[in-house]
Image (cartoon, helix red, strand yellow):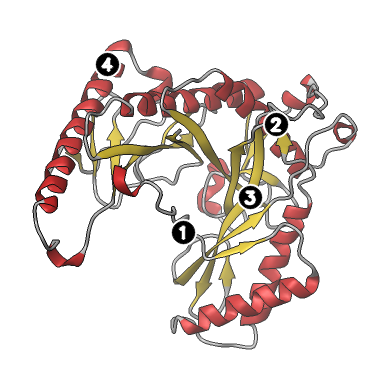
Amino acid sequence: MIGQAFAGTHLATDWVSENSTLATAEVAEAYESILNAQGSALDKMSEQKASQKILPFGFNMNEMVTDMAVTKSGLLGLAAMKANTGVEIKWKKIASLKAIENENVDFVIESEVSDAEVGDIADSIRNVVLASGKIKDSTQLRSNIHEALQKVREQVKGIEVTTYNQWQARSLRLDLNFGVNGKVFFFAKAGVALRLRMEWKLKEVALTNNKLASLNDQTKFVVKTLAELNVALAKVSVPGFEPSKVMIGVGVSHKRNFFGIWKYSAGFVGWLGFVPVNVSNNKSIVPVNIPVTLLNEEFTIGGTDEAAAFKIWWPWRKRTITHTSFATGMEKSVQTAAFFAQRADANSSAHWRVEEVKTVNDISHTGFFGLADLSARGIVEIDFKRK
C-alpha cells in the first residue's frame, strides 16, 4: 500500500481555516510524496504490460481513483475504506485521455417537460425499477414516482435565474430511493432497496436588472451562490487546471417550498450543479449589480418544520449563516481545492497524469466550510480538471 491509511481518523471540518504554515507544508510534502509514488508505480505497471504480448486477464487499466484524508494536525494519507473523504484524485492513462467520462447518472431530464412527458418518464422509471427484481409491484408504485417527479419539477420551474457572469447553475442532480414496498424517498434511509440517480437540466436564463425586482426563495439562493462563486473563483489561478464543476447539497422542506443548503439526509434532495461559462465574447450581456441587501440575507441550513418527523436532527433543523460566513467559507473551499490541484500538476509520471482533483467540503456550526468529516456526507464538492 502506498501512503499511510487512517482508519477511523476524522477529517477536520475547519482544517482550512486553522491550518498553520507548518501544517500546510506537511500536507503538501505528504501529498506530493503519494503522487510521486503512485506515478512511479503506474509507470512501472504500464511498462511491464507493454512488454507483454497478451495483457493479463484481458483487461487494461486506464484510470485510477485515490481518496485521501487530511487530519487537523496536518497529516495526510490514503483514506480508510468506505470513508467519505475530503480529497479525491483521478489518474488517467495519457493514451486514453479522450475516453468519455461516466457521470453515473441513470436518467437525464430536460428542463421543460409537459405533464404528459412527466408521466412517460414515470413509466420508464417504473419499468427499470421492476426490472431490477428488488421492488414489489403495486398500484401505488407508478403514482409514487409521478408524485416525486412533480415535486422536483415544481422546484426546477421556480428557479428563474441560472446564469450570472462567469457561472451557471446547470442541473439539479438527485436520487430516487425505493423501498421494497414501492415507496419513494428523496433521501437514503433504512430499508432502501434500490437507488436511481437523475439529473434535471436547468434552462439557461441570465440575471437581468428586471429580474432583480422580485426573486423567489429558489432563485435568491441560486443568485447568491452564483455571486459568491464568481468572487471566490476569480481569486484562484491554477496552472494546468481549471474549475469545472461545483456541486452544492440542497433540499426542500416537507411543508414549505424552502429551497437551500441542507445539512443532513433527513431533508436532503440532491445537488445543484454549477459550471463555468465563457462570456468573454458575448458583448450583449448587460452588467448587473446584485443589491447588497440581497447578498446580506442569511442562508438557512435545514428547514423550520422537520423536528416532528426527524427529532434526532433537531440541533441542525434551523440554523442560519451570515453572508460573510458563507462568502468566506466558499472562498476557503475553493482555495483548498486549488491547493491540491496546483500540486498535482507537477507529478513526473511518463504514462499517466492526474486529470481531476475533487475536494468534498462540509459546513461547521460556525458557518465555515472545511474538508468533510469521514463519517459525514459533504455539502460542497469542487472539481478541478485538467485544461
- Name the residue tied to disc 2: 224
The answer to whether 107 is drawn above or below residue 162 in the figure is: below
Image vertical order of residue 93 relative to residue 157, above or below: above
C-alpha distance separating marks 1 and 2: 28 Å
Task: Quickly name the residue at label 4.
Answer: 25
Task: Tell us which disc is closer to us: 1 or 2.
Answer: 1
**Which-is-in-front pick, marks 4 and 1?**
1
Indicate left or right for 250 with 84 as reference: right
Dot placed on the residue nearer the N-terminal end, 1 or 3: 1
Closest to the observer, 129 or 280: 280
The crowding category of the residue bearing disc 1, from other C-alpha atoms within 10 Å (few below 14, some 14 to 19, many at least 20), is few
**What residue is rendered at 82% in x and 29% in y?**
284
Disc 3 target residue: 171
Residue sitting nearer the eye, 255 or 127: 127
- Is disc 3 surrounded by few (<14), some (14 to 19) or many (20+) residues within 10 Å? many
Mark 2 or mark 4, earlier in chain: 4
Judging by the rendered image, the residue that carries numbered circle 1 is 104
Q: Earlier in the sequence, mark 2 or mark 3?
A: 3
Question: In the picture, which quadrant includes the N terminus?
Answer: top left
